Amino acid sequence: MPFRQLVGHRHLFELLSGAATRGTLPPSLLFAGPDGVGKRAAAIALAQLLNCPERVEVPAPAGSSRGARSKSSGAAMVDACGTCPVCRRIARGVHADVMELKPGETGSIKIEQVREAIERAGYRPFEGRRRVIIIDDAEALVEPAQDALLKTLEEPPPTGIFVLVTALPDTLLPTVRSRCQRVRFGRLSPEEITEVLVRDHGYRDPEARAAASAADGSIARALAEGSAEFTGARDAALALLSGVVASPDPAARLGLAKDLAATGGGRGAAEREALARRLRALASLLRDLEVLSARADGRWLANGDLAVGLEALRRSFNGERVLAAFAAVDRALDALERNASPKIVADWVTIAM
Ligand SMILES: [Zn+2]
């Protein structure tokens, strides 16, 4: 996602964009700040801006009555278009000039990974203008790997740029820290977190507000502490999709519909709301299946923690089927709002999958 689609940090994005377009961006950056505030997303947006051939100019944000927007200098900002093939490839993690290092199974980033990145940073860009090396969870760099980085951070190759991303900058070697320009990310406001939960994670406004208020400025924490209801709804939605794949016969699916509608004995409005929650979770899973069916990078899933379960469904829910299922869920939510019986809605949506 380009900068303008990320929430918060507008002032930082304006500084980064200004430096990138003037050609004064320091070649070694350290994105530091709490977990779950969008540091890594900002590194990707920067890689897009540096390589996008169709940059756009974004006007300064209008004053928001919610006060959700972070400070802006009031000036327009140059941004990546977000839709050209280059931007899309970077977003999917398949652009040849944008490389991301992250901790492996051992939880650390090894010297071999860093050596390879340094070597690749030295090549001329294949398809873009700048090679961008993003080191995510940089605190996981083992000490020899940090030592190996030092020389490159000090004198990076002319077309390369390193972005270290970490919530624990002070655990890096002082020599590494001092060679990077630090970009400080603050916490997000509850309004900003609410916006992301609603837009990207299928929350409804009241649920999102509740989760955001307890999240201490971090989207990751809001998601981790999401209500048990939300998790339960998602499990039920995943069970429905798995069941549907195993039962192509519509008659056999009515049992699944019963499970979908069985929401813990609530009645009336509570029953309706519980089913709606499950349907919204279903919509969120279907969006992820669409991402997977486009062979995009699984790191971008809204329900990344369910990646294994989703991957198992990918073959069955691909292309047109996933779109049709998504439309069916949309209609089911609509019907539920117009007071249709939860049982009938559950039956109908299950057969329409
Ligand atoms: Zn672009």
Image (tube, rainbow, N blue to C red):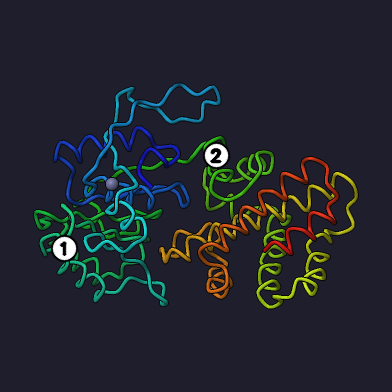
Q: Which residue is mark 2?
A: 195
Q: Which mark is residue 174?
A: none
User: What percent of the width, then of the height, locates residue 352?
Assistant: 70, 61
Hey, what amino acid is under mark 1? Ala
Quadrant for residue 147, please give it: bottom left
- Residue drawn at x 35%, y 25% as measured from the top left: 60
| Residue 22 horizontal side relative to residue 105, left or right | left
Q: Which residue is mark 1?
A: 121
| Residue 218 horizontal side relative to residue 283, left or right | left
Quadrant for residue 242, please give it: bottom right
Which of 48/29 is in front?
Answer: 48
319 above or below 113? Answer: above
The crowd level at tag 1 (other Cα within 10 Å; few <14, some 14-19, many 20+) is many
Q: Is mark 2 within 8 Å of ligand 1?
A: no
- Residue drawn at x 62%, y 55% as measured from the top left: 283
Hey, what amino acid is under mark 2? Glu
| Residue 283 horizontal side relative to residue 21, left or right | right
Precedes in sequence: disc 2 or disc 1? 1
- Residue drawn at x 30%, y 61% as measured from the top left: 135
| Residue 285 horizontal side relative to residue 80, left or right | right
| Image quadrant containing the C terminus | bottom right
User: What percent of the width, then of the height, locates residue 293?
Assistant: 48, 66
User: What percent of the width, then of the height, locates residue 261?
Assistant: 82, 59
Which of 233/242 is in front?
Answer: 242
